[in-house]
Image (cartoon, grey):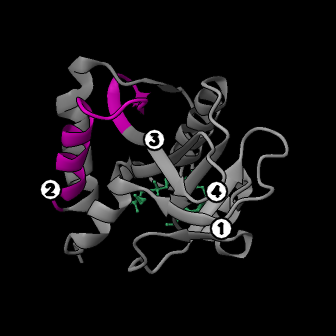
């Protein structure tokens, strides 16, 4: 497998919107994720939406949206998802690039915590760990994957407890699955 070279990750621009829609539609083989991104864009702030470009083709997209912890300690937090890499370009490092650039952008924006509902084997290399042993529960627990969390600023994981609200992922989990 050839690792991707010449991949540029940059913030999404308005003229990317149709290609982001097509990418999510193609990757997930259902309209749920594509429509969700369209719905969230105008109403959610802050929003980190990044695209990966290869030879002027849009081959990847990742979205970060605000997450809340309903508990005693409030933190600036965001949740990840959906994330999509074109089916013909998966497992070439593009998802990892999107994730790393997104994490860096959130850190610069003073975000303290990141959540994702996902495969631990993929996310642990970016510092994510199981959220439940830390006292954090996902408000919508029908996913086969656990809630994961990482602190992107030092010493931010102490004293956490509560229910994590992460609206986009709840919407996705309620939708029928593609396969
Ligand atoms: C999940 C996804 C975004 C990952 O992007 P990618 O570009 O394929 O990922 P990378 O190439 O950076 O993968 C990095 C590592 O994670 C592993 N990996 C990738 N996808 C994985 C998965 N679904 N489960 C477990 N490990 C995975 C790869 O083996 C790779 O490890 P390696 O480099 O040691 O071989 C992409 O596969 C995808 O779009 N999948 C379909 C949509 C989806 O499930 N999105 C996530 C939920 S919203």
Mark 4 or mark 2, which has the lower sequence index? Answer: 2
Mark 1 or mark 3, which has the lower sequence index? Answer: 3
- CA gap between label 2 and label 3 equals 19 Å
Mark 4 or mark 3, which has the lower sequence index? Answer: 3
Q: Nearer the viewer, mark 4 or mark 2?
A: 4
- CA gap between label 1 and label 4 equals 16 Å
- CA gap between label 2 and label 1 equals 29 Å
Q: Quadrant of residue 141?
A: bottom left
Mark 1 or mark 4, which has the lower sequence index? Answer: 4
Q: Which residue is nearer to you in this view: 27 or 81? A: 81
- CA gap between label 1 and label 3 equals 18 Å
Mark 2 or mark 3, which has the lower sequence index? Answer: 2
**In the rendered image, the vertical position of residue 134 relative to residue 41, given as above or below:** below
Spot occupied by residue 134 in the image (x, y as percentages of width and height): 73, 69
Residue furthest to the front: 72
Q: What residue is disc 4 on?
A: 72
Instruction: Identify the residue at image location x=36%, y=24%.
Output: 12
Element on which disc 3 rests? strand
Q: Nearer the viewer, mark 1 or mark 4?
A: 4
Spot occupied by residue 120 in the image (x, y as percentages of width and height): 63, 69
- CA gap between label 4 and label 3 equals 23 Å
**In the rendered image, the vertical position of residue 70 relative to residue 156, given as above or below:** below
Q: Which mark is residue 131?
A: 1
**In the rendered image, the vertical position of residue 106 relative to residue 64, given as above or below:** above
The local crowd at label 4, few if under 14, some if 14 to 19, many if 20 or more residues have their Cα within 10 Å, is few
Spot occupied by residue 150 in the image (x, y as percentages of width and height): 69, 53
Residue furthest to the right: 155
The local crowd at label 3, few if under 14, some if 14 to 19, many if 20 or more residues have their Cα within 10 Å, is many
Magenta-colored span: 30-59
**In the rendered image, the vertical position of residue 141 relative to residue 32, given as above or below:** below
Q: What residue is disc 2 on?
A: 31
Instruction: Identify the residue at image location x=26%, y=40%.
Output: 40
């Amino acid at each position: 497998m050839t690792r991707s070279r010449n991949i540029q990750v940059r913030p999404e621009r308005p003229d990317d919107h149709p290609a982001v829609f097509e990418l999510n539609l193609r990757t997930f083989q259902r309209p749920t994720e594509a429509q969700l991104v369209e719905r969230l864009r105008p109403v959610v702030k802050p929003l980190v939406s990044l695209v990966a470009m290869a030879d002027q083709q849009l081959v990847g997209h990742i979205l970060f949206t605000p997450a809340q912890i309903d508990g005693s300690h409030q933190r600036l937090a965001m949740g990840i998802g959906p994330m999509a890499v074109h089916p013909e370009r998966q497992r070439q490092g593009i998802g990892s690039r999107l994730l790393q650039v997104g994490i860096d952008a959130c850190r610069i924006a003073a975000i303290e915590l990141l959540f994702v509902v996902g495969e631990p084997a993929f996310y642990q290399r970016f510092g994510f760990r199981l959220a439940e042993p830390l006292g954090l529960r996902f408000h919508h627990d029908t996913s086969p994957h656990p809630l994961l969390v990482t602190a992107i600023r030092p010493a931010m994981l102490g004293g956490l407890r509560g229910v994590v609200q992460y609206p986009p992922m709840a919407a996705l989990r309620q939708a029928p699955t593609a396969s």
